[in-house]
Amino acid sequence: MKRVVITGLGTINPLGNDIDSFWDNAVNGHSSTDYITRFDASKFRTQIACEIKNFEPQKYLDRNEIKRSDLFTQYALYSASQALEDSGLDISSIDPFDIGVIWGVGQGGMETFESEVENYVTGNYVPRFSPFFVPKLIVNMASGMISIKFGLQGINYTTVSACATSNTAIMDSFNYIRLGKAKIFVTGGSEAPITAASIGGFSSMKAMSARNADPLTASRPFDRDRDGFVMGEGAGAIILEEYEHAKKRGAKIYAELVGASMTADAYHMTSPHPEGLGASKAMQLALKEAKLNPSELDYLNLHATSTPVGDIAELNAVNKTFQGSSNLWVSSSKSMTGHLLGAAGAIEAILAIKSINENIIPPTINIENLDPLVPKGIQIVMNQPLQKKVTTAMSNAFGFGGHNSTVIFREI
């Protein structure tokens, strides 16, 4: 099997519109939660979210790309442009069929769907929808537009596995390179779910926090008083490259991707298995593929979204997998970014990779009273970053429908 390394990173998310600002704000424990400005959320139980600030799509996108793309695709193009720039790849010198795009999206063009249906119902466009309605709406358009923008003609598709989908995309890209089907992939995920329909739907499920009086502390994984997740938005892009190809061109290498796996809970539409059986198996399989003993893992960026049931189920899975390893530290960056749904795994994988480069583990903020149900022996990085040698890092991403996905990175 061929080896696979990371040679480029890019992002736009509530903590920063590039990798450096994202990392700096994550390490320093900044909360991005505030009141929703995209629409009037005053009638909803949840009125807060983690919105991107000062988005300037024209920095990387031309006028037609902006006009013809939903926000989730704009985020994808923006982050992919950064990652390819960061990689130093000279695309013109590479066979375009050797470069693919596998991208993760959970919901797709919710903003487009809402605006078009509203215009139709109110009579503004009767009886005609915009000709861009379907192209802007469908979830595969992010991968398609990245391919078109950069002339990448290799394997190209979108994975959809709810909030596990970025890791799914990364895993598929990893396997295609290992099998010799491509040399390079642009992978990751994007989501733009801060819309009335999306916020309203999750709010009615009581899945999101209603801590409207104190937004900055609303996302609080593992805290006794957590009451749901906070919605986030954005994208993360990762350039995966076959090791010998990267080495030959003298590429900057962030880390090596050494393990990836997926399992299913087969338990419930929206709730994880309470004992974390599927999640534990995903972590075990990824460790096995990476040829790592549980005691060799240094850092785990948890999926933990700040829901009462989900956080403890995942920690039960961690406890089962690592059996109180004294070397392992865990944290949840969603305490700062909110939950980016289909993009969550991508930006959390980036933090795992950066933790290896910088030997710093970002904290879980807003823990005031640790939940007594947290299993004994699990070491959570709480409220302040932890300086620690990080050689190996894992990132979990789970989704509605019982999808579990895990990726592991190692220093190279």
Image (cartoon, rainbow, N blue to C red):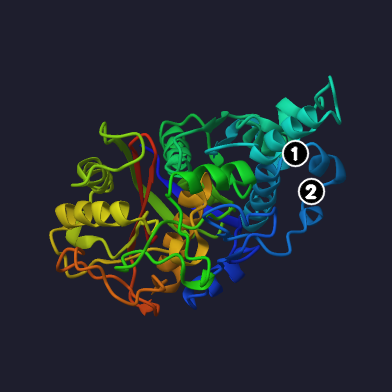
How far from the left and from the top, in percent, is residue 193?
A: 59, 46
How far from the left and from the top, in percent, is residue 213?
A: 52, 71
Nearest the camera: 368 or 180?
A: 368
* Residue drawn at (73%, 41%) of the image: 92
Task: From this view, report whether residue 398 is shown above or below residue 25.
Answer: above
How far from the left and from the top, in percent, is residue 74?
A: 71, 46
Indicate which disc residue 206 carries.
none
How far from the left and from the top, in percent, is residue 104?
A: 53, 39
Task: From this view, report whether residue 267 is shown above or below residue 370.
Answer: above
Seen in the image, is 267 located left or right of residue 258? left
- The amino acid on which the numbered mark 1 sits, given as a three-letter code, is Ser
Task: From this view, report whether residue 199 is shown above or below residue 372.
Answer: above
Nearest the camera: 253 or 370?
A: 370
Quickly name the residue at label 2.
61
> Distance of mark 1 from mark 2, alpha carbons?
10 Å
Seen in the image, is 285 located left or right of residue 22? left
Picture mark count: 2
Q: Quadrant of residue 319?
A: bottom left
SS at circle 1? loop
Question: Which residue ends up furthest to the front in the rendered image?
Answer: 43
Q: Quadrant of the N terminus?
A: top left
Find out whether the residues at labels 1 and 2 contact each other: C-beta distance under 8 Å: yes
Quickly name the residue at label 1.
69
Nearest the camera: 95 or 31?
A: 31
Question: Which residue ends up furthest to the top in the rendered image?
Answer: 127
Whether residue 90 is visible to the viewer of this picture, yes or no, is no
* Residue drawn at (25%, 68%) of the image: 371
Marks 1, 2: nearer the viewer: 1
Disc 1 packing (10 Å; few <14; some 14–19; many ≥20): many
* Residue drawn at (48%, 45%) of the image: 204
Nearest the camera: 19 or 129?
A: 129
Disc 2 packing (10 Å; few <14; some 14–19; many ≥20): some
